[in-house]
């Protein structure tokens, strides 16, 4: 396999990483990461070094250096959420068998990690000679998924999957070394770490991390050198709320080359408000920890608000019915589970051969996401099979399209839709609403949805909340919604 980060030896003067007012160009990054990588590789080959390293993934330049160094050394990285709870941390440490923790200086590690050897990442340059490139199938990063029915599972991502996904996005987004990516995403997930840090480094471009997301900081960076933005729907919702009355933000966004949203669906209303104020369309893409990126709206394609675009180069995608039979009709109506295959897939769930086997239908990965596909090949996610496919009155209904319809109502700020048992319908549709000002009535919302979609898709129950429960990436935690 060719070098994962060729720019470390080819574009020395270009800025690679900037966190706040701290920055490293490619020559500096190589001179700091290479010595640490050699130490990790040498100690591992001698038999006394780490098999895997945990990186305490704060929003810091040291986190970027630590991950790059471990990848150069061929030592698998386990990024750890600094906000993880005691039980989750204990499980990750035990399951991954990490034998070293890397962090920025001055970190007081929690008890679950204190018993392990700990190395603080210092930004001290040395010999920039890079170690030999590891094999393409070598484990690179192990990301622990949020456990919904049990402890988190460690998703083993090989170097091949990372390189393929980042190169496929180069094609889809026309991503080049001249791009400067701006974001404030956490660095313990695929979105913020692999796409948001390793992506620019693979292209030879620049990443500017905001530390903590704010629209003011975003506008400042886009008014400077920023050309691309990565964010999650909660961030874009804040942008949509402000952009009409914030000329500085509107002007900065209008000058960006690419705005990308991921990790959850972006409501169509937020798409429309941002486009109206800036002239820019927000691009949505679709991926999972296990698959990295599967689809995206292309930079040179149709905008397609509400869709996640078309399959990326090298990714095969199909929809299957409940019996596992492929759905041949690309009619934009037929709902099926997404299955994918390609070089973007993970290798295994660490220590879980049973879960790995259950996740595949032959060589097709079962995503658990439900979608439709139109005649142009555009995929529209309607929800998760386990929580978002509602069977009501003989119909199969995706929660996502109802949620999009609900947030088009002027009195609805946010919406989530679930199903609950109903003696007559099988399941009835429940809308969970965060109101904008005065609360609308249940009948008003039911009529609104019935007018936009179809009568059988209207909510039968409406429940109001002050806020929807969300995880770190902005995804609504529907299992926390109960009557």
Image: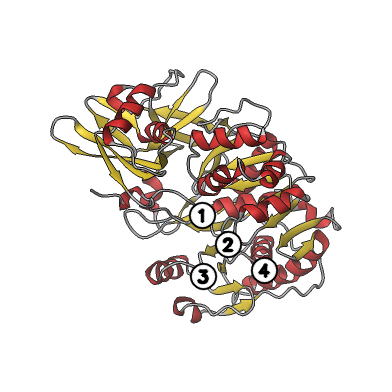
Query: Residue 26, located in which quarter of the rendered image?
Result: bottom right
Q: Residue 299 at what x, y percent from top left?
A: 67, 32
Q: Nearer the viewer, residue 261 or 115?
A: 261
**N-term mark: 2 or 4:** 4
Q: Residue at x 72, y 53 (%)?
A: 220
Q: Residue at x 51, y 70 (%)?
A: 98
273 on left or right of 17: left
**N-term mark: 2 or 1:** 2
C-alpha separation, residue under disc 2 versus residue under disc 1: 9 Å
C-alpha separation, residue under disc 2 versus residue under disc 4: 17 Å
Work out whether 353 lies above or below 96: above
Reading the image, the residue beneath label 2 is: 76
Reading the image, the residue beneath label 4 is: 62
Q: Nearer the viewer, residue 154 or 333?
A: 333
Reading the image, the residue beneath label 3 is: 98
Disc 3 crowd rating (10 Å Cα; few below 14, some 14-19, many 20+) is many
Q: Are marks 2 and 1 in contact (CB under 8 Å)?
A: yes
C-alpha separation, residue under disc 1 versus residue under disc 4: 23 Å
Q: Residue 392 at what x, y percent from top left?
A: 24, 29
Q: Residue at x 53, y 26 (%)?
A: 378
Q: Residue 12 at what x, y percent from top left?
A: 85, 58
Is residue 175 in sight in this rendering? yes
Q: Residue at x 35, y 43 (%)?
A: 433
Reading the image, the residue beneath label 1 is: 156
C-alpha separation, residue under disc 1 versus residue under disc 3: 14 Å
Work out whether 71 lies above or below 270: below
C-alpha separation, residue under disc 3 versus residue under disc 4: 19 Å
Q: Are marks 3 and 4 in contact (CB under 8 Å)?
A: no
């Amino acid at each position: 396999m060719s070098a994962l980060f060729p720019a470390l030896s080819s574009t020395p003067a270009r800025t690679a990483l900037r966190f706040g007012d701290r920055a490293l160009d490619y020559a500096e990054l190589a001179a700091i990461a290479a010595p640490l990588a050699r130490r990790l590789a040498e100690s591992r080959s001698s038999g006394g070094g780490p098999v895997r390293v945990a990186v305490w993934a704060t929003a810091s330049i040291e986190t970027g250096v630590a991950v790059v160094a471990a990848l150069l050394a061929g030592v698998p990285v386990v990024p750890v959420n600094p906000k993880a709870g005691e039980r989750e941390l204990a499980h990750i440490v035990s399951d991954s068998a990490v034998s070293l923790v890397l962090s920025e200086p001055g970190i007081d590690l929690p008890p679950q990690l204190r018993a392990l050897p700990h190395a603080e990442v210092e930004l001290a340059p040395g010999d920039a000679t890079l170690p030999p490139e590891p094999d393409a199938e070598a484990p690179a990063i192990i990301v622990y998924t949020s456990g919904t029915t049990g402890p988190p599972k460690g998703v083993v991502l090989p170097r091949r999957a990372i390189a393929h996904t980042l190169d496929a996005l180069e094609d889809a987004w026309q991503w080049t070394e001249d791009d400067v990516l701006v974001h404030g995403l956490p660095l313990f997930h695929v979105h913020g770490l692999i796409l948001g840090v390793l992506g620019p480094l693979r292209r030879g471009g620049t990443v500017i991390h905001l530390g903590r997301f704010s629209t003011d900081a975003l506008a400042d960076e886009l008014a400077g050198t920023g050309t691309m933005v990565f964010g999650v729907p909660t961030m874009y919702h804040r942008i949509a709320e402000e952009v009409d009355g914030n000329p500085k933000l509107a002007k900065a966004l209008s000058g960006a080359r690419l705005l990308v949203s991921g990790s959850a669906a972006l409501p169509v209303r937020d798409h429309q408000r941002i486009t109206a104020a800036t002239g820019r369309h927000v691009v949505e893409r679709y991926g999972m920890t296990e698959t990295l990126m599967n689809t995206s709206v292309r930079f040179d394609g149709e905008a397609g608000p509400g869709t996640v675009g078309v399959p990326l180069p090298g990714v095969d995608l199909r929809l299957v019915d409940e019996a596992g039979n492929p759905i041949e009709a690309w009619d934009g109506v037929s709902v099926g589970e997404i299955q994918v295959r390609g070089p973007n897939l993970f290798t295994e769930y660490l220590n879980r051969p049973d879960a790995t086997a259950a996740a595949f239908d032959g060589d097709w990965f079962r995503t658990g996401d439900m979608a439709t596909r139109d005649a142009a090949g555009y995929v529209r996610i309607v929800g998760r099979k386990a929580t978002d496919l509602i069977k009501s009155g003989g119909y199969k209904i995706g929660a996502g399209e109802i949620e999009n319809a609900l947030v088009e109502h002027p009195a609805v700020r946010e919406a989530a839709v679930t199903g609950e048992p109903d003696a007559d319908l099988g399941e009835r549709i429940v809308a969970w609403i965060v109101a904008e000002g005065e609360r609308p009535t249940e009948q008003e919302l039911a009529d609104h949805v019935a007018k936009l979609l179809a009568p059988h898709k209207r909510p039968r129950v409406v429940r109001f909340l002050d806020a929807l429960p969300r995880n770190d990436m902005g995804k609504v935690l529907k299992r926390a919604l109960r009557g």
